[in-house]
Every structure is written in structure tokens, then in C-alpha cells.
Image (cartoon, helix red, strand yellow):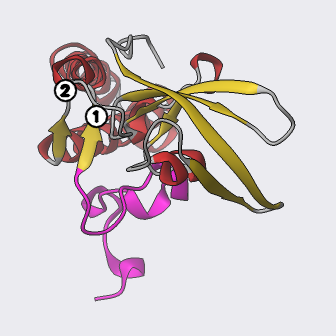
Amino acid sequence: MSKDFTREEDRDGDDELPSELKVPAGSKNYMTPGGWRRLKAELHDLVTKQRPELTQIINWAASNGDRSENGDYIYGKKKLRETDKRIRFLTKRLENAEVVDPEAREATDQVFFGATVTYLREDGSEETVSIVGIDETDLKRHYVSWTAPIARALLRARDGDAVLLRLPGGTEEIEIVGVRYQALNTEYPS
């Protein structure tokens, strides 16, 4: 059956995500323990607080009479659909999660998920990124998704290796000058 003929509530919403938020087909949804706790806390808040409050408002608005012109009822139903969609999304993300703790990794100079990597660019500048889950990306903190081009270039390389970074504007050779595994604060609000 075509997606056009399914109810909005029946869709999981994954097709509507930007490509950088989609988990690659056949891959696990890697995330840090902090990122997992953050998504779990958001899901708990939606299920135990926000959704019950919305249903209470909708019931009150429905009791006021004509639903076709009742703004509280119409807005409440729309907000409830959005909340239910987010609940389904978070539930699916958490069910498919593979939690990897960077602190628990054995000491190695090879880059894996959870690594904090320092590298030199061709222009001589030094940058540091931490490789985190798709839902934990925060460029201000230099947390990049394991699916990002920089992370894909760095994964499996070792300290001292030069790797080729492929970007839409061309390629650049970068040299890894440090690999460490440390606790990452990914429990911040998004």
C-alpha cells in the first residue's frame, strides 16, 4: 500500500528525518550512556507528564461542545499527534540503541566510536572532535556523529596516520595526532 494512503499516526516518521539523523541501513544506533539516558528521560517525560496533560486538555475542550470550531480541541489533537510521533520515534531509537561507553574501552591508539581525536589539517591548524551518536551531535562542543564525513575518515585509523577527508568541496589530507577515550557529557538538553 502506498504511503499516501496510510494514516499519519501509522507512520514512524523516519522518512521525514534529514539524512544526517537517519541510522544507516543495517547499522546499529550507537550512542554513549549519557545520550541514552537523555533520550530515555525525554521519553519518560513525554509519556508520564506531557501526554497525560494533553489528553486532559483535549477532554476538557471536547466537553465544551462543537469540536469543529474549538481551537483548544483542534490544537490539542494536533499537539497530541506530534507527541505520539515523538514517542514512537524515541521508542524505536532506544530499542535499536547500542550503548558504548568510551571510558570502558581498553586503551588503544585506534579510532572507534566514542574516541576524542585531535588532528592536523593541511593548513596547519589543529582540531579536536569526539565521535558520538547521531542524536548526540553538537558542533559547539565538537561532538560529531559517527556517520559524519570527518568521523568516517577517522574511524579505524590510528594515532600518527594520515587519512583522506572527502567533503563536497574536495578532499583534504589530515593527520591524526592524538586519540583518547574519556567521559563525554552528552546529557545536555537538545
Query: Which amino acid, mark 1?
Result: Met
Residues at discs 1 and 2 in contact (Cβ within 8 Å): no
Single out the residue that lies furthest toward the right: 123
Single out the residue that lies furthest toward the bottom: 1
Which span of residues is magenta-colored? 1-28
Identify the residue at image location x=28%, y=20%.
42
Q: Residue 31 bears which disc, if any?
A: 1
Query: Which amino acid, mark 2?
Result: Arg
- Mark 1 lies on a secondary structure that is strand
x and y percentages locating residue 9 in the rendered image: 29, 56
Q: 10 Å neighbourhood of mark 1: few (<14), some, or many (≥20)?
A: many
Identify the residue at image location x=18%, y=42%.
97
In space, the residues marked 1 and 2 are separated at their CA atoms by 14 Å
- Mark 2 lies on a secondary structure that is loop
Q: Is residue 122 above or below residue 33?
A: below
| Left or right of residue 129, residue 104 in this image | left
Identify the residue at image location x=38%, y=17%.
186
Q: Is residue 163 above or below residue 135?
A: below
x and y percentages locating residue 107 in the rendered image: 24, 24
Q: Viewer-proximal residue, 154 or 96?
A: 154
